[in-house]
Image (tube, rainbow, N blue to C red):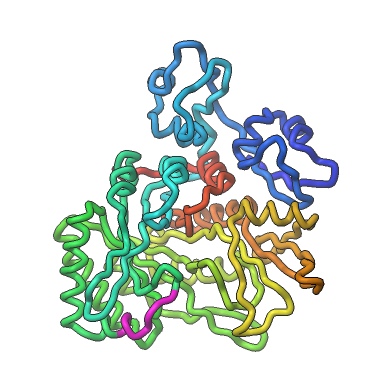
Amino acid sequence: MTIHIVQPGDTISTIAEKYKISVVRLLQDNGLTESTNLVHGQALVIAYPRQTYIVKTGDTLSGIADANGITMLQILRNNPYLNERKYIYPGETLVISYNNTMGKLTTNGYANSFINMDILKKTLPFLTYLTIFGYRIIENGEIEDLNDDNEIIRMAKEYRVLPIMMLSTLNLQGIGSVDTSYNLVYNPKNINIFIENTLKMLKSKGYGGINLTFQYINEDSRPYYENIAKLLTSRLHQEGYLVFVTLSENFVYDANYITFEQIDYTQIGLTLDGFTLLNFNWGYTYGPPSPVESQETLSEFVDYVNTKIPPKKTEIGISTIGYDWELPYVAGVTKTKSLSITSVITLASNVGAVIQFDEVSQTPFFRYTENKNGILRKHIVWFVDARTVDAIAELIIVNANRGAAVWNIMNYFPQLWVILNSQYEIETLL
């Protein structure tokens, strides 16, 4: 696999010719159409299958899979567009396999229960876990169920993906409650109620485990979080359920640098089945313009966590959201809007932007000016692209971590899955 950065004069056909791949393959792997306007600085994934098959009259997907010694899941993973079709056509080329020999990893996709079913079907073949958001911890250890998720749980199992219930104090807008979190972890009675409510929910819904967010953990509160982790895991393990925790960096801001609070996760690491290092990005932010992901900060955080938690228990988060800031930024006032990666590229094309790349954070950005009611407004957009994903995947393998956690899969990001699937072996549990 390689990544091509679009230059002036590039077209889809010239790029395909340069790398000796078909136009169809280039379009499919990058979510493009023949009418797509390429953007100067845009990153495109060039993947080379190890084995392909040309469909013949009378062929079926199951027959092709059997003849080539692979599963239907692998056929759908290597050719995700097939999830949108009822038929295959003579003469079209299917990918049978890639040289995915760079290592094994798990993949965990976060989603709301109202995810578009077509997007879910295309994504499920790439997943080890599907973590479903929408269960909210409220007062006194009770759990608010905001989901109609029976169908996506069923679909996950059909695709051999383990469904995981995500528990947090966060609402659908990403706003959490410090009071609710502390009222839970500091109150033994509420902890017991919470554990039994969790177990009841897991059984009734058919989940394989939970993912609990430790959103407000710090060194002072750590012993109390250790206690709830120990009690929860002990009880759920008795019933055969897995217990994961999502950890976010607690950033410490200094005049000259940004770092994170060093919390001793050792005891928690001994207790739980796995951890996700992930900063939740939502539909808006009041923070200053900055990279959506920072490879430098992430590497430092992963290096630290790996000294406290066995690397094989840890997933590293990948964000699939871009942010558009209007400038000048005013703290507490400027509200930044989020965009899907597809929308980011469309915006860049529409405003004639040139995409630049920050080597330190390994993330792309661009600037543009908007005429808003006769007033010129400057903007900066930070997002992630194929280079960001590739850097994080490499970080996972170099550090021998468990895998990647994608926040979120509500929009389909084809480059991400091509990068992971063409280079690494994705594990399945069911």
Q: Is residue 16 above or below residue 369?
A: above
Instruction: Tell me the quadrant of the picture where the C terminus can be found.
Output: top left
User: What residue appears at the point 29 percent right and 65 percent down from the top-left corner?
Assistant: 272
Give the side of residue 237 with respect to residue 367, left or right: left
Residue that lies at the very extreme toward the top in this rendered image:
57
User: What residue appears at the point 65 percent right and 40 percent down from the top-left corner?
Assistant: 32
Q: Is residue 303 above or below residue 127?
A: below
Labels in figure, total: 0
User: What residue appears at the point 28 percent right and 76 percent down from the top-left corner?
Assistant: 138
Give the side of residue 213 with respect to residue 78, left or right: left
User: What residue appears at the point 73 percent right and 69 percent down from the top-left corner?
Assistant: 379
Give the image location of residue 364, x and y in percent: 69, 60
Residue that lies at the very extreme toward the right in this rendered image:
9
Residue in the foreground of this view, choosing between 12 and 336: 336
The secondary structure that most of the magenta stretch takes on is helix
Give the side of residue 293 with respect to residue 34, left or right: left
Highlighted range, magenta: 175-182
Give the side of residue 382 with respect to residue 246, left or right: right
Give the image location of residue 407, x and y in percent: 48, 59
Instruction: Tell me the quadrant of the picture where the N terminus can be found.
Output: top right
